[in-house]
């Protein structure tokens, strides 16, 4: 076990909590009484919290950002606008889920398989496997963060799995690291549903759900972020008005730029 470097606790603006900074420590085993901390280790941040004699650790990746939203929220359109603002490829790396890897491509193919569709639980396992590959493979998210001065922005992450796949999605994804910031694109579910009906010539298996399901998924997202509000920074971006795309992309850029 690596020896923990002792440093003093100081106040920081992150979540308005006390922050304990440890550097150059590959492994941490610590017990911090009754306080919530963010411990930064190179590109890795570890949150620790004690409650009723229980201890848990949540990993958060520094310089890793996620853009989430229900289908039709304008999430991908905003991400594309953001790419234009982040025009230095050496500083900003954009990715998405499903990823461009082998498993991600398999998911995309199966999402269009209407004749003999996979079970939803099978999709849940595939998404988790793709996420593991996306994070840990050679040239994946962790390697990029650890070897380059780069900020990574992903269109969708594990929150989608939890919102769409419920308890199984949570169990399969609970041990993955979280992003430093999540930008949730809030859109009225009715507007999002109408956008899909109007603008998309071909929908996948999940986008064929009825409007009522859109409402349910939106509520699930909000519940997820409510539970995580003391652990990660969630920024809500209202995109119910289509003309707000440029404005919202700039808002996100100002919060992640170097």
Image (cartoon, grey):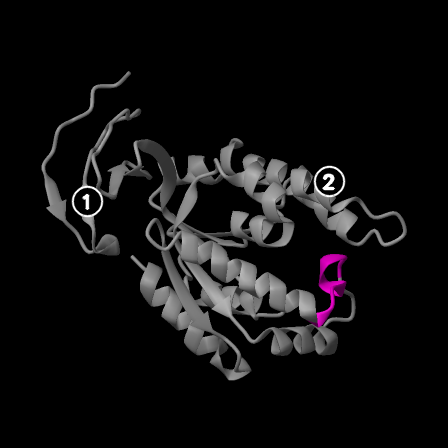
* Disc number placed over residue 19 in the picture, else none: 1
Any magenta on residue 2?
Answer: no
In which quadrant will I find the C terminus? bottom left
As drawn, 81 above or below 153: below
Q: Which residue: 55% across, 35% down?
A: 132
* Image quadrant where residue 204 sits: bottom right
Q: Which residue: 69% across, 72% down?
A: 196
Describe residue 239's horizontal placement relative to residue 122 as left or right.
Answer: left
Q: Dot 2, how many residues are within 10 Å of its Cα: few (below 14), some (14-19), or many (20+)?
A: few
The answer to whether residue 89 shows anywhere in this view is no
As drawn, 92 above or below 44: below
Kindly check if marks 1 and 2 are in contact, taking CB atoms under 8 A apart as contact. Answer: no
Rendered location of residue 12, percent (x, y): 17, 52
The answer to whether residue 74 shows anywhere in this view is yes
Residue stretch rendered in magenta on the structure: 204-211
* Image quadrant where residue 60 sits: top left
Rendered location of residue 202, percent (x, y): 78, 66
Q: Which residue: 56% across, 76% down?
A: 188
């Amino acid at each position: 076990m690596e020896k923990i470097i002792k440093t003093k606790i100081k106040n920081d603006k992150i979540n308005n909590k006390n922050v304990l900074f440890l550097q150059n420590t590959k492994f941490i085993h610590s017990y911090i009484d009754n306080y919530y901390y963010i411990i930064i280790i190179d590109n890795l941040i570890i949150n620790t919290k004690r409650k009723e004699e229980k201890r848990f650790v949540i990993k958060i990746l520094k310089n890793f950002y996620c853009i989430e939203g229900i289908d039709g929220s304008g999430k991908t359109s905003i991400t594309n606008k953001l790419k234009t603002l982040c025009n230095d490829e050496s500083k900003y790396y954009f990715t998405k889920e499903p990823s461009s890897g082998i498993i991600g491509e398999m998911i995309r193919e199966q999402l269009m398989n209407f004749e003999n569709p996979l079970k939803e639980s099978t999709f849940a396992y595939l998404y988790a496997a793709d996420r593991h590959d996306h994070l840990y493979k050679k040239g994946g998210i962790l390697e990029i963060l650890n070897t380059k001065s780069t900020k990574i922005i992903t269109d969708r992450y594990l929150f989608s799995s939890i919102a769409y796949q419920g308890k199984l999605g949570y169990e399969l994804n609970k041990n993955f690291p979280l992003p430093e910031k999540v930008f949730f694109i809030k859109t009225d579910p009715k507007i999002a549903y109408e956008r899909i009906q109007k603008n998309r010539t071909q929908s996948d298996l999940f986008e064929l759900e009825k409007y009522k399901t859109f409402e349910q998924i939106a509520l699930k997202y909000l519940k997820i972020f409510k539970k995580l509000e003391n652990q990660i920074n969630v920024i809500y971006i209202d995109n119910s008005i289509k003309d707000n795309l440029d404005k919202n992309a700039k808002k996100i850029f100002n919060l992640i730029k170097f």
